[in-house]
């Protein structure tokens, strides 16, 4: 089942990378599907004779978790295939399969190795509780516990599941006005200002202020039932600041904001025509400064610049915040780097690992041992040396491969990429583990790479691959290791599931990418594409690389137009300090409740996408984490996470079906006929269509 679902999810993810529609295979979807298939297999495979070997006992929680973890490791389009696709389509560089597959393996596994070495800090402690997976855990608990004890919870689960399943038909297809119901838009459908502030039912429309969203798909992008109250409050502050700053920047015409669309993620000429990145590419796959001078320096929409600033502030603030508030929790993370630890690890490598009975190194026996982790101690651990070996092998391969794949990234660039990744794995993943809110380091590392490797888009892509992707993989796999800890899946089984899932998924990715590119080369290169295939995402990725690789220093150096973007990184380092000082001297003010990194990150939160969901997100979040938790704690304890799981599950299964039935995943798009509630010609909330 694990292999089957891994094949399914990785193939789907890769195919959809080359399609005009997007489709993601979510964790909850995989969980529900695997539960259904697993129970069905137990029911239908006979249990007598030889079959008893295939079907020895009812499908259980650990088996289910194993399948989920394996498929989850496979369920994405590996960033390396995107890099290879750009190389093949736009640079006519064709690394062989013998170079490409190791590239994929190393870039997918490096983060796993490094992250794994930090698991005693990022997974074992109770503090790192990964709120976003609690609904899943609650669901597995309910499914697999003794039926009589959980009957009521099961009933609640399937009722909520069915209701939301049917409901999603409305906001997603029949009645999309419900995505963003805004009185202001309905009252003033012809005002650009109203559209910018209140519109939010369509991508890049407006800020969706006071708009009410009834579509769980958007509300649950970060599941509000799970984000802890502290994090919610900080996010709310950041969100309000975001609206104020975006409006101020646009109407104050900062960076010529009013020349360009309010929300946009692309580059423009000063006259708001789209910037053509291909015109600045010179020979040798490098950006030519003379051509840049001819074309002039491009502009971003100002709200996007604010997003970049907010991201940098947040990343820097994360480092300081964790250092001053959580230094004790983090100290252990670096112990594996000490010489004594290397000695220890070396001694610990059990060359005849099949005979090794396993013991748990690295954690002290202390009183506040996480209860879930305490129960894991009865299983042999997957030793540090396994993770270490994974990291070292990937590293060696990476150093060879960047030259074999004509990446133009020198070895020292790779070293810096990995150092950045390692630092951010510790800090950003720790923040994610405590708050459930992920930060992206993508734009930050793109900028760094742009400075280090001027004018080299391809080096930029490889740098991002080995820093951003490494961190992402670490985050994904550490989260899944926590799933293993919650359901008490033995550590070695979890290790096997993740490594097999990752390698198998990467191979599937590569096979599909190669075959799609050789068969659809011309379609993918055309701007329009067809309605079945489209090179739009590859193209975007390529232009991003050219923009950052070629223009970082021109756009962002001190004295240039956007110099606050890198400077905000320095400012961000100081942001958490006042709150810490205030807390030291006036603890009654409770400034220890403030997550400055989240406030900073949320200042950029509305820069892209469908924004109508924010109000609903905060309402549900506060209702769950504050009202239910304090006023009805028993109800909260029993039902909060199972309801969250049911809502996610029902929504995701319906969205999956809809994407094939009506959103063109199978080739043809069938939008609902236009009516008041489905304004197909404009914005769904009837706010003015700008641009
Ligand atoms: C905007 O400027 C660019 C570059 O100077 C030029 O190529 C383009 O035609 C202009 N567009 C309009 C609409 O004037």
Image (tube, rainbow, N blue to C red):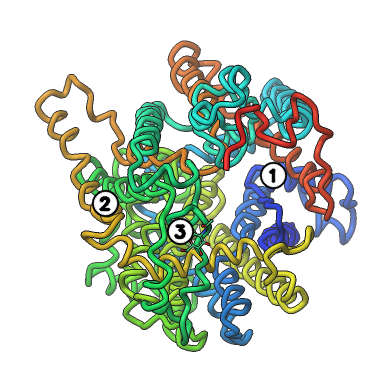
Give the residue number, with chain letter if any, for mark 2.
564
Residue 688, above or below 343: above
- Dividing the picture into quarters, in which one does residue 556 lie? bottom left
Q: Residue at x 77, y 76 (%)?
A: 519
Whole-percent x and y of residue 254? Answer: 33, 43
Say if disc 3 is inside 8 Å of ligand 1: yes
* Mark 1 or mark 2, whichever is nearer to me: 2
Query: Taking the image as drawn, is residue 414 in sight?
Result: no
Who comes first in sequence, dot 1 or dot 2? 1
Which of the numbered marks, if any, corresponds to residue 29? 1
Residue at image position (44%, 19%) is 626
Q: What element carries label 3?
A: loop
- The answer to whether one can see residue 335 in this image is yes
Residue 98: x %, y % from top left: 60, 87
Q: Give the position of the C terminus as an image quadrant.
A: top right
Labels 2, 3: front one? 3
List x then y, in percent, for residue 31.
68, 45
């Amino acid at each position: 089942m694990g292999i089957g679902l891994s094949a399914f999810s990785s193939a789907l993810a890769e195919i959809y990378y080359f399609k005009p529609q997007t489709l993601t295979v979510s964790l909850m979807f995989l969980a529900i599907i695997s539960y259904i298939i697993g129970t069905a297999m137990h029911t239908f495979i006979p249990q007598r004779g030889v079959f008893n070997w295939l079907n020895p006992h009812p499908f259980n929680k650990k088996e289910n978790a194993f399948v989920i973890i394996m498929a989850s490791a496979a369920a994405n389009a590996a960033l390396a295939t995107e890099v290879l696709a750009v190389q093949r389509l736009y640079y006519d560089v064709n690394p062989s399969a013998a170079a490409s597959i190791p590239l994929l393996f190393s870039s997918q596994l490096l983060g796993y190795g490094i992250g794994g070495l930090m698991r005693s800090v990022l997974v074992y402690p109770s503090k790192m509780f990964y709120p976003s997976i609690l609904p899943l855990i609650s669901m597995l608990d309910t499914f697999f516990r003794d039926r009589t004890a959980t009957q009521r919870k099961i009933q609640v689960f399937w009722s909520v599941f069915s209701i939301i399943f049917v409901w999603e038909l409305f906001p997603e297809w029949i009645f999309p006005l419900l995505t963003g119901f805004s009185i202001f838009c309905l009252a003033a459908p012809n005002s650009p200002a109203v559209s910018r502030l209140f519109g939010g039912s369509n991508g890049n429309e407006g800020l969706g202020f006071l708009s009410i969203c009834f579509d769980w798909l958007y509300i649950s992008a970060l599941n509000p039932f799970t984000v802890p109250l502290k994090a919610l409050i900080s996010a709310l502050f950041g969100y309000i600041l975001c609206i104020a700053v975006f409006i101020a920047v646009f109407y104050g015409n900062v960076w010529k904001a009013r020349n360009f669309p309010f929300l946009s993620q692309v580059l423009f000429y000063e006259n708001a025509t789209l910037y053509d990145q291909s015109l600045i590419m010179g020979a040798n796959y490098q950006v030519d400064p003379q051509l840049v001078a001819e074309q002039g320096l491009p502009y971003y929409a100002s709200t996007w610049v604010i997003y970049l600033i907010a991201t940098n502030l947040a990343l820097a603030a994360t480092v300081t915040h964790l250092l001053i508030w959580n230094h004790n929790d983090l100290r252990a993370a670096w112990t594996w780097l000490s010489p004594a630890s290397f000695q220890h690890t070396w001694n610990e490598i059990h060359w005849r690992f099949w005979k090794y009975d396993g013991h748990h190194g690295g954690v002290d026996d202390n009183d506040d041992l996480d209860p879930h982790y305490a129960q894991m101690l009865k299983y042999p651990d997957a030793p540090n040396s396994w993770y270490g070996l994974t990291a070292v092998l990937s590293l060696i391969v990476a150093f060879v491969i960047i030259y074999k794949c004509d990446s133009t990234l020198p070895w020292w660039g790779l070293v810096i990429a990995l150092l950045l990744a390692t630092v951010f794995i510790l800090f950003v993943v720790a923040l994610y583990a405590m708050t459930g809110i992920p930060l992206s380091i993508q734009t930050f590392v793109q900028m760094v790479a742009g400075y280090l490797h001027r004018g080299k888009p391809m080096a930029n892509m490889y740098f991002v691959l080995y820093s951003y992707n490494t961190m992402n993989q670490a985050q994904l796999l550490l989260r899944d290791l926590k799933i293993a800890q919650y359901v008490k899946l033995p550590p070695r089984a979890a290790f096997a599931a993740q490594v097999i899932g990752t390698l198998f998924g990467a191979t599937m990715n590569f096979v599909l990418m190669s075959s799609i590119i050789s068969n659809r080369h011309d379609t993918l290169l055309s701007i329009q594409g067809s309605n079945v295939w489209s090179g739009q995402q590859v193209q975007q990725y390529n232009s991003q690389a050219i923009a950052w690789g070629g223009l970082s220093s021109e756009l962002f150096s001190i004295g240039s137009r956007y110099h606050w973007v890198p400077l905000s990184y320095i400012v961000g380092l100081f942001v958490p300090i006042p709150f810490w000082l205030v807390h030291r001297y006036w603890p009654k003010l409770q400034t220890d409740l403030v997550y400055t990194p989240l406030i900073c990150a949320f200042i950029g939160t509305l820069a892209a996408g469908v924004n109508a969901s924010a109000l609903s997100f905060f309402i549900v979040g506060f209702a769950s984490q504050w009202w239910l938790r304090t006023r009805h704690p028993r109800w909260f304890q029993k039902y909060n996470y199972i309801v969250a799981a049911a809502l996610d599950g029902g929504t995701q299964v319906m969205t999956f079906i809809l994407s094939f039935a009506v959103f063109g995943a199978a080739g043809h798009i069938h939008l609902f006929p236009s009516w008041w509630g489905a304004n197909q010609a404009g914005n769904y909330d009837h706010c003015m269509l700008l641009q």
